[in-house]
Image (cartoon, rainbow, N blue to C red):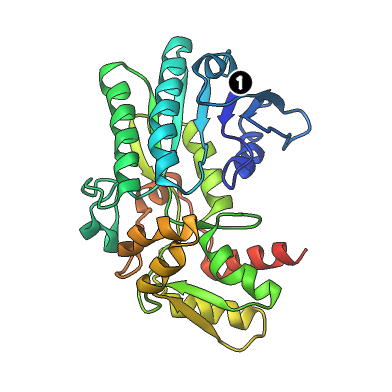
Amino acid sequence: MQVILGAGGDIGTPLAKELRKHTDKIRLVARNVQKVNPDDELFAADLTNGELVKKAIIDAEVVYLTVGFPYDVTIWRKNWPLVVDNVISACLEHQTKLVFLDNVYMYDRTEIPHMKEDSKINPPSEKGKVRKIVLDKLTTAMQEQGLPVIIARSADFYGPGAKNGILNILLLSPLKKGGKMMWQSNADKIHSFTYTPDAAKAVAMLGNTTDAYNQVWHLPTSSQKLTGREFVKISSEMANKKVSFFILKPWLMKIIGLFDKTMNNLVEMQYQNTQDYFFDSSKFCERFDFTPTSYEAGMKETFDYSKA
């Protein structure tokens, strides 16, 4: 039995499909849970409830924590430490391995131009500080309590049906709807994006590879170094549209943030967009002989999916 806690999200859904290659017993856990595969076992639970989490992972060999919370630091401060404590406790009790889907918010701002698994941890944002608390809890559980843990880290992501995918939101969805494409802060800086089907496939592979545990892994991400302007050009050509977009400058985001909570929470993260942002996944790609999907192919798949 393999269990996805926080099923149904942008990574959790394709992960459920990928896990069928490794097991015929999959349990999906979420507050409003729905089947992905016909024979998925469903368990409705709020992960902030520790007793429900313990029941949710009974008989599990591997647990995948892919839950996402609204993009609000207040909610993150309240929910993330609690949920991770609940999951660690449950996994220790049931002697279950844990795979945690992570992001790059805990890295020092100077590491952003070339991020690797051993990059310096020193979060410059409030949301990053929450992620460091989570990382510290997982590291302690791994090193001091013997919990087998994989930290599977993703860059900003995009992909078919990814509601929170950055390229989906900024470029591909507006393009589909005839709206104006956008970019954050500086379109002449390099930015990496992880393709959600690649990420899901990699998370499933890691969870089912014994010697992958007790390590940090960057999920497979194209090594192409494209700027925002180049992403806009690819999108425009793909849709046979004239290149046209506007820049969400930090000062504009601050103004919009007065009326929009999500935008307000994006302001502190602009250090990731005012400099090059390159996510190095060579460790995974070399270990598993994996070639990440190119941006051209991934964006076409995402755009075609959005048209369906």
Quarter of the view holding residue 265: bottom left
For label 1, the crowd category at 10 Å Cα-Cα, with few meaning under 14, some 14 to 19 and many 20 or more, is some
Question: Toward which corner of the image does residue 226 lie, by quadrant?
Answer: bottom left
x 45%, y 47%: residue = 72
Answer left or right for 136 relative to 190: left
Give x and y (percent) for residue 24: 68, 26
Q: Position of residue 164 (x, y in %)?
A: 56, 54
Number of dots carrying numbers: 1
Disc 1 secondary structure class: loop
Relative vertical location of residue 160 with respect to residue 57 in this rendering, above or below: below
Please identify the residue farthest to the front as the structure is shown: 258
Q: Nearer the viewer, residue 93 or 21?
A: 93
Q: On the rendered image, what quadrant is the C terminus found in?
A: bottom right
Position of residue 188 in the picture relative to residue 53 (left or right)? left
Q: Which residue is mark 1?
A: 1
Residue at the location (45% across, 52% down)?
Answer: 220
Residue 38, percent from left and from top:
78, 33
Residue in the image at 45% along x and 23% along y:
87
Q: Residue furthest top?
A: 93
The answer to whether residue 291 of the structure is visible from this angle is: no
Q: Amino acid at mark 1?
A: Met
Please state which of residues 195 and 271 is positioned toward the viewer in this rendering.
Answer: 271
Residue 284 visible (yes or no):
yes
- Residue at image location 39% in from the left, 71% down from the top: 225
Query: Which quadrant holds the N terminus?
Result: top right
Vertical placement of residue 164 versus 248, above or below: above
Which of 260 and 35 lies nearest the eye of the viewer?
260
Quarter holding residue 81: top left
Q: Position of residue 223 (x, y in %)?
A: 40, 64
